[in-house]
Amino acid sequence: MRGTLTATGIVLAVLLAYALSCIIRPFRDCWVCDGQGHFRSKSNRKLSRPCFWCHRTGKRLRIGRRLWNRARRLHRAAN
Ligand SMILES: [Zn+2]
């Protein structure tokens, strides 16, 4: 029982830390273009294409923040 409580505490602490980090830094570098906003084609190095995933911003919302935004939108829609 004690072990279960400790495990739950650790999971909660990790979740809390992740939530806090999502509040402090809601954006992360795009994993497709490494935050460049565009990427070079592998066959032709001179050819640079705008990144489709981050819409050329080089930043993407983190999953935790996206979930949070969706939850807030739902909450607002309910009221
Ligand atoms: Zn990108």
Image (cartoon, rainbow, N blue to C red):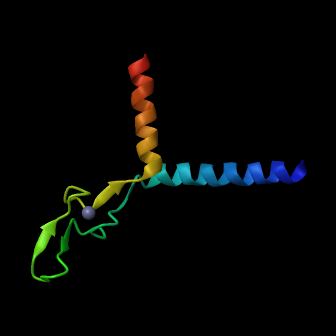
Residue 68: image location, x then y, percent: 46, 40
Residue 70: image location, x then y, percent: 41, 36
> What residue do we see at 20% from left, 80% from top?
42
> 20 or 67, which lies in front?
67
For the C terminus, which image quadrant?
A: top left
Most extreme residue toward the right is 1
- Where is ligand 1, by quadrant? bottom left
Left-right relation of 63 to 20: left
> What residue do we see at 21% from left, 65% from top?
37
Residue 46: image location, x then y, percent: 10, 82
> 23 or 75, which lies in front?
75
Most extreme residue toward the top is 79
Residue 67: image location, x then y, percent: 45, 42
Left-right relation of 45 to 19: left
The image shows a total of numbered marks equal to 0
Question: In the figure, 6 relative to 48: above or below?
Answer: above
Question: In the figure, 1 relative to 48: above or below?
Answer: above
Most extreme residue toward the left is 47
Q: Which quadrant of the view contains residue 30?
A: bottom left
> 15 or 3, which lies in front?
3
> What residue do we see at 47% from left, 48% from top?
64
> What residue do we see at 64% from left, 55% from top?
14
Left-right relation of 14 to 49: right
